[in-house]
Image (cartoon, rainbow, N blue to C red):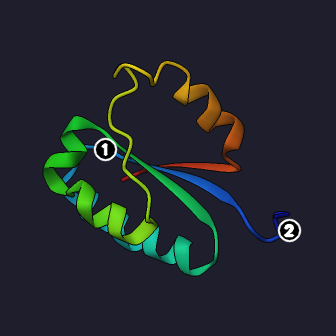
């Protein structure tokens, strides 16, 4: 399947801030545009916004730890895949 010109691959990284809940709205808007989105969340970010919320919006598991066994090259693959990376908030 070819990617349309207006389709984007987006990485949304959520940090540990009380405003982290706003990432859910941003993820939802991105999905509505038809863009692919992969969410990452810091340990602190997960205290303010649960993984289940972002997984429900994106249909993909939230990445949380690049040091888990089997994830050694995930950060490289993700960087190659992404058209846009957003650290929010």
Q: Which residue is mark 1?
A: 15
Query: Disc 2 or 1, which lies upstream in sequence?
Result: 2
Q: Residue at x 34, y 69 (%)?
A: 56
Q: Which element type, helix, strand or loop, lies under badge 2? A: loop
Q: Would you place residue 33 above or below residue 8 in this image? A: below
Say the numbered circle drawn on residue 57. none
Where does residue 80 sit, x and y in percent of width and height?
71, 36
Q: Which residue is mark 2?
A: 5
Question: Can see residue 23?
Answer: yes
Q: Would you place residue 25 above or below residue 16 in this image? A: below
Binning the other alpha carbons within 10 Å of mark 1 as few (below 14), some (14 to 19) or many (20 upward) gives many
When asked about the image quadrant of residue 41, the answer is: top left
Q: Residue at x 19, y 40 (%)?
A: 44
Where does residue 46 sit, x and y in percent of width and height?
20, 47
From the viewer's side, name the closer residue of 21 and 67: 67
Where does residue 21 sit, x and y in percent of width and height?
25, 64
Q: Decide if residue 21 is on the left or right side of residue 70.
A: left
């Amino acid at each position: 399947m070819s990617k349309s010109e207006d389709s984007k691959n987006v990485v949304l990284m959520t940090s540990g801030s009380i405003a982290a809940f706003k990432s859910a709205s941003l993820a939802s808007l991105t999905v509505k545009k038809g863009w692919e989105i992969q969410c990452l969340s810091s340990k602190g970010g997960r205290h303010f916004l649960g993984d289940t919320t972002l997984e429900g919006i994106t249909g993909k598991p939230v990445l949380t730890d690049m040091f888990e066994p089997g994830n050694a090259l995930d950060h490289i693959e993700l960087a190659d895949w992404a058209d846009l990376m957003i650290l929010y908030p």
